[in-house]
Amino acid sequence: MKKSAKQFKDVLGFVFPIFVVLVGWEVVSRLELANPILLPPPTRILVHTINLLSPGGNGGVSFFLERHVAISFFRIMAGYLIAASTCTVLGLLMGVNRAAYNFFNPLITLIMPIPSLAWVPVVILWLGLGNKTIVFVTMIASIFPVIYNSAAGVRSMTIKHIWAAQTMGAGRVTIFLKVLLPGAMPYIIAGHKLALGRAWRALVATEMVVATGYGLGYLIFEARTFMDTETMYGGIAMIALLGLLIEKIAFSKLERLTVEKWGMSRSL
């Protein structure tokens, strides 16, 4: 019973500020304190978005928005997962091996300040327009938070933890799996959250330039041409919703199975 009450309180605490902002937005738009074309009411955006999600036979546009969402989701997952799988390993290697850290750190420090979008013209020449370029730029955007946080997590462990494990007879592999990796996991998860946020920004911006036909970034940019602000806000809302679902479903479960279970942190 207490757990259900806490879950309800958590949900209410999350939803209430959003509800207040949406109500204020609705009032401002309905009273025309702001241009209702540039800032349409949330209720009208919701109705329009449902229409875009509906089958064509019911006055909708034949699951129009789902196709854009599905393609953007595929692109971001492809780019992010490539970066996540390779760069987590590289970050951990940099954390445990000083030679690897000294070799890769100057290269990463040099490349990291370059905005992801600066690579777009170059990657277009390599890969052309379409999915390959979008996935590649999304991958570049995801790389650096994963590497740095993975390395920082391992390097943040104090030598006393390692000495304690060695005293109990633990070898290198055991120390890595039982001491360094659990200790680094909060940093690793934080790095992946930051990487996914950067990946979304890179994805939408790149789709506005490179996408041919589908993608949320493409949808938002094309809607601007026709002053279709309801579609624009609907596309932005879908990006926020997808990010929220990934955060609450994937990362929250991963945190419960790792850092909370291991006692590295606790849920508030």
Image: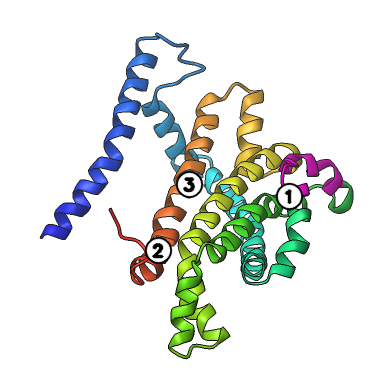
In the depicted structure, whether residue 207 falls above or below residue 196: above
Front residue of 150 and 180: 180
In the depicted structure, whether residue 231 falls above or below residue 242: above
- Pointer 3 local density, CA inside 10 Å: few below 14, some 14–19, many at least 20: some
Q: Which mark is residue 255?
A: 2
Amino acid type of the residue tagged 2 in the rendering:
Glu
Amino acid type of the residue tagged 1 in the rendering:
Thr
In the depicted structure, whether residue 164 falls above or below residue 184: below
* Relative side of 46 to 93, left or right: left
- Pointer 1 local density, CA inside 10 Å: few below 14, some 14–19, many at least 20: few
Q: Which residue is mark 1?
A: 109
Name the residue: 74% across, 62% down.
102
State which tag comes first along the sequence, 1 or 2: 1
The x, y position of residue 254, in whole percent, is 42, 65
Name the residue: 30% across, 42% down.
14
Residue 70: in sight, yes or no? yes
Residue 59: in sight, yes or no? no
The x, y position of residue 201, in whole percent, is 61, 41
Amino acid type of the residue tagged 3 in the rendering:
Pro
State which tag comes first along the sequence, 3 or 1: 3
Q: Which mark is residue 55?
A: 3
- Residue 45: image quadrant is top left
- Pointer 2 local density, CA inside 10 Å: few below 14, some 14–19, many at least 20: many
What is the span of residues highlighted in magenta in the rendered image?
109-124
Front residue of 123 and 112: 112
- Residue 96: image quadrant is bottom right
Labels 1, 2: front one: 1
Which residue is farthest right? 125
